[in-house]
Image (cartoon, rainbow, N blue to C red):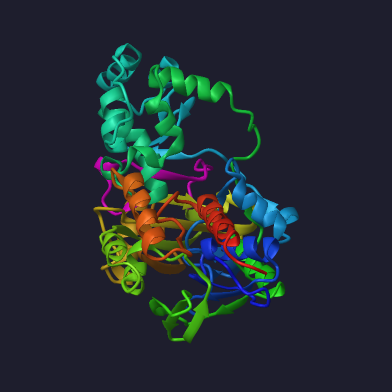
């Protein structure tokens, strides 16, 4: 973009979730003279990162409660915004899978893919038939080329149904609210690397584990919960001149005669030299239609799953003493309501309240199994029924909270990467200077969103003048 030397570029970021905030961090640090406005349709920043006081505790997360440390983006951001010395790690790494009963997650695996025969035969989670089927994986011929199938199809073909349904699907599906039989094989980089390799999956998993050098904690979070990362990041960009406007939904974006963008919404009209769209794909479709009908239609067709987070506080004396792990995942064939449960007071030392309560965070619903249409009373009842069944106990909560995340988890269908490349090319053709970023496109999870926000900002930084 050519610009007048006296012109101060203006970048509008649509979406005040962690992607949009991370994009602003990149711009205020690399282009300190650029004017930045973040537009957020809600009355708070953070998107699907949210927390509130609960059961006497000052802050209990209502969504993600940690970030992966092996992906550096979140840790780097936390350090940059002043939280580097305030990070904590889970008190326990022991977790379970429920399939008729609680079982420890099999050891020596890569996201559930066995790295050895011992990994298969030492766990009771597989039937004898399932163990035999998984054991022949190294003997199966390898297909040539990269598959465009679903992750479920690829794992079933190599390791059999039980490895997929009893371990891989709970691990992946529990994180992304997805059904792995409809999830892109390329959307989990570690598994994609194994499946695309020349040798067996078992050999690839064994090699991957042997070359890991990350012996430290896997997860981390600020002591005040994930929302404190949002608050610190928002304060960081504000302190460096960025403006954040809340309750500011966007209705349209159009070009003006100067080849700039006019962002129209509840805030009025803002003229921008570049725009970063950091909102979910389906929600972005309406206001991008004026710029690119084709891109808008592709975005509108994207699917997002809904989940419900039920938070419960139960008396400690009702809690089974032997249950000291961090939580459990439920296998897809056995799911009735709960897909995952976190024993938050076991997992995090700062969530052990003074009233001797056990805090539980329970996820209900996933792609293909919506639950958010139930009323709060029904959702709590369903959560308790599953918990009492799974844990063989009789929990009676004295505090409860229901949080609905409607159409908040993008689903990466087979051909996802091809579709994203097509979207990028359409936007580049029809609206150069507009960049799509966030969980809908290049990775799900907090580190991936942060990295993609900063990637988008670097592309914008090459176009603007400060």
- Between residue 228 and residue 352, name the one nearer to us: 228
- Between residue 78 and residue 322, name the one nearer to us: 78
Quarter of the image with the N terminus in it: bottom right
Find the magenta span and give its range: 319-338
| Residue 303: quadrant of the picture | bottom left
**Residue 378 x, y percent position in the rendering:** 28, 67
237 relative to 190, above or below: below
- Between residue 280 and residue 65, name the one nearer to us: 280
What's the residue at 71%, 54% (across, down)? Answer: 79
Q: Is residue 15 magenta?
A: no
> In the rendered image, is residue 427 in sight?
yes
Kindly report the secondary structure that dominates the magenta region of the rendered protein: loop
**Residue 333 x, y percent position in the rendering:** 24, 41
What's the residue at 37%, 34% (across, down)? Answer: 167
349 relative to 31, above or below: above
Q: Residue furthest top?
A: 139
What's the residue at 52%, 76% (across, down)? Answer: 272
446 relative to 17, above or below: above
Image position of 453 (left or right of 182): right
Q: Is residue 330 magenta?
A: yes
| Residue 297: quadrant of the picture | bottom left
**Residue 43 x, y percent position in the rendering:** 50, 80
Image position of 18 (left or right of 214): left
Image position of 436 (left or right of 68): left
**Residue 269 x, y percent position in the rendering:** 47, 85
> In the rendered image, is residue 65 in sight?
no
């Amino acid at each position: 973009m050519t610009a007048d030397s006296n012109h101060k570029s203006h970048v509008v970021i649509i979406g005040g979730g962690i992607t949009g905030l991370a994009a602003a961090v990149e711009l205020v640090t690399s282009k300190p003279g650029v004017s930045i406005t973040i537009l957020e349709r809600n009355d708070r920043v953070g998107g699907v990162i949210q927390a509130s006081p609960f059961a006497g505790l000052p802050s209990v997360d209502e969504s993600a409660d940690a970030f992966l440390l092996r992906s550096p983006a979140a840790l780097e951001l936390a350090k940059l915004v002043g939280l580097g010395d305030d990070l904590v790690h889970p008190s326990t790494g022991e977790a379970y899978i429920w399939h008729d009963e609680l079982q420890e997650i099999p050891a020596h695996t890569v996201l559930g893919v066995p790295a050895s025969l011992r990994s298969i035969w030492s766990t009771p989670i597989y039937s004898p038939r399932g163990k035999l089927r998984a054991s022949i994986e190294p003997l199966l011929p390898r297909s040539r080329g990269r598959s465009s199938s679903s992750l479920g199809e690829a794992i079933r073909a190599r390791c059999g149904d039980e490895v997929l349904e009893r371990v891989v699907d709970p691990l992946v599906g529990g994180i992304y609210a997805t059904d792995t039989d409809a999830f892109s094989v390329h959307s989990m980089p570690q598994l994609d690397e194994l499946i695309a390799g020349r040798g067996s999956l078992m050999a690839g998993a064994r090699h991957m584990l042997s070359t890991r050098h990350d012996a430290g904690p896997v997860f981390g979070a600020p002591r005040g919960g994930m929302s404190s990362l949002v608050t610190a990041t928002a304060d960081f960009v504000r302190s460096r001149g960025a403006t954040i406007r809340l309750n500011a939904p966007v209705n349209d974006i159009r070009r003006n005669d100067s080849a700039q963008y006019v962002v129209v919404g509840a805030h009025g009209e803002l003229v921008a030299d570049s725009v970063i769209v950091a909102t979910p794909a389906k929600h972005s479709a309406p206001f991008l239609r004026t710029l690119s009908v084709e891109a808008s239609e592709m975005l509108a067709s994207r699917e997002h799953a809904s989940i419900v987070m039920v938070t419960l506080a139960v008396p400690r004396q009702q809690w089974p003493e032997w249950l000291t792990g961090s939580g459990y995942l439920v296998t897809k064939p056995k799911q009735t309501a709960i897909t995952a449960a976190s024993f938050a007071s076991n997992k995090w030392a700062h969530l052990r309240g003074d009233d001797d309560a056990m805090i539980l965070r329970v996820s209900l619903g996933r792609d293909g199994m919506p639950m958010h249409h139930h009323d709060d009373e029904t959702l709590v009842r369903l959560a308790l029924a599953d918990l009492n069944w799974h844990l063989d106990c009789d929990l009676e909560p004295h505090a409860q909270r229901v949080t609905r995340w409607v159409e908040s988890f993008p689903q990466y269908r087979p051909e996802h990467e091809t579709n994203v490349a097509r979207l990028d090319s359409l936007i580049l053709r029809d609206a150069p200077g507009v960049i799509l970023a966030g969980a809908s496109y290049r990775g799900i999870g907090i580190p991936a969103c942060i990295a993609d926000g900063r990637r988008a900002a670097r592309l914008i930084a090459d176009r603007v003048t400060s």
